[in-house]
Amino acid sequence: MALIVQKYGGTSVGNPERIRNCARRILETQRAGNQVVAVVSAMSGVTDGLIKLAKEVSPEREPVEREMDVLLATGEQTTIALTAMAINALGGKAVSLTGAQAGISTDRVHTKARIVNITPDAVKKMLDEGNIVMLAGFQGETASGEITTLGRGGSDLTAIAMAAAIKADLCQIYTDVDGVYTCDPRVVKTAKKIEEISYEEMLEMASSGSKVMQSRSVEFANKFGVRFEVRNSMNNNPGTIVKEETPGMESVVVRGVSLERNQAKVTIDDVADRPGISAAIFGAISQANITIDMIVQNVSFDGITDISFTLSAADLPKAEAALKAVIPNLGDKATLRTQSGIAKVSVVGIGMRSHSGVAAKMFKALADASINIQMISTSEIKTAVIVQETEVENAARVVHTAFGLDA
């Protein structure tokens, strides 16, 4: 008997027919002689609908994040109940558990909480009693009993973390595509499925905009050695295995191309070039719980410099509010500028460690397509650039072709 964790995304449970389809798949897995924990997301469109409602009842100011968590957690709770009902109607035996009931403890950062600990006693008890456990993804609770959510894509993290906690034999992430592709197939029609990919590559692709997996869930899988498979909930095709790096993987220089829309750039002009300035800027950003990406500081001239960084466009209002409080301390001439309507294109591959010329090839492909690069960031296995959002799809296509990734 194997212990299996399965996760089903919002499109996989997007309507009653799809919920019944998932219920049949889950029940078949159990009837094959396995114990099953199934993590589900909110039905497709439900979370966006709840956010819209929140903004409609609170038009003058951003809704309080504590109450947003209480609201958004209901999406997954609806799905676990409906899927458990569908399994029971098929003759199975299923029980639904919220994140709190399953023992998922988090910190107190509402809307972007991090898992602190999992005590899966209730999950194990339900499994031992012959139940399929339907577990609400995306949520947990603080030590004081407050509901928290884990951020967009948090159901992936729930599945990976629970698989680690109960020492599952297999973790399957079901989605609406056949696996991880060399680029988003909706953007690059010639993208092809990757059979296996390392944790590092998957983490870089996820953090660079690939929507197949949440980056924190991949980081968690890497830390705890949870090997998992990304596959399609609509068919039985083999998916993509995400695992530890193997020697043969380095023979592929670039594994894939990612694109991330809805980015914004913040620039602070004419800041004083002295110790403590960067600490003041990014300390304010950190206190606002904002995650930033690229950082560029210009060469100092006459004792002043410029600092730019990128972040999600959704966090731009919070960043502006946080920085306005510290601008007076950054120099007499310091001013704040922001820009939205930009996007990021990244190439990722562990083979980049041992092969030169990747950045040059990427830049030439973009230049040949008359696409201007605004910012550049590199790591050992990634090169990323910022371009206008209107050009991001064409940028992804020309770079994908330049590295021979077309099917």
Image: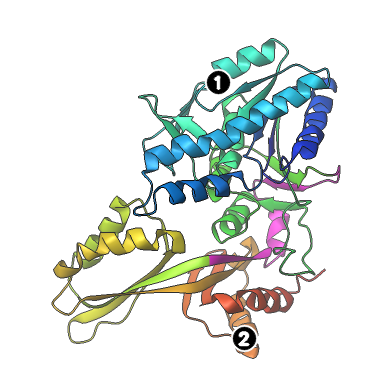
Q: Is residue 106 visible?
A: yes
Q: Residue at x 55, y 75 (%)?
A: 389
Q: Are marks 1 and 2 in contact (CB under 8 Å)?
A: no
Specify the quadrant that holds the C terminus.
bottom right
Specify the quadrant that holds the N terminus.
top right
Q: Residue 276 lies in what quarter of the image?
A: bottom left
Q: Is residue 263 above or below residue 90?
A: below
Q: Position of residue 86 (x, y in %)?
A: 77, 26
Q: Residue 76 lies in what quarter of the image?
A: top right
The magenta segment is: 235-261
Q: Position of residue 7 (x, y in %)?
A: 68, 37
Q: Position of residue 121 (x, y in %)?
A: 55, 15
Q: Residue at x 68, y 67 (%)?
A: 253
- The kind of residue tagged 1 is Pro
Determine which of the numbered discs, if any, sits on residue 364 in the image. 2
- The kind of residue tagged 2 is Lys
- In magenta segment, residue 257: yes
What residue is pinned by disc 1?
A: 120
Horizontally, is 29 left or right of 206 in the view? right
Q: Residue 82 lies in what quarter of the image?
A: top right
Q: Residue at x 17, y 80 (%)?
A: 333
- In magenta segment, residue 104: no
Q: Is residue 109 visible?
A: no
Horizontally, is 223 left or right of 246 in the view? left
Q: Residues within 10 Å of mark 2 (few under 14, many from 20)?
A: some
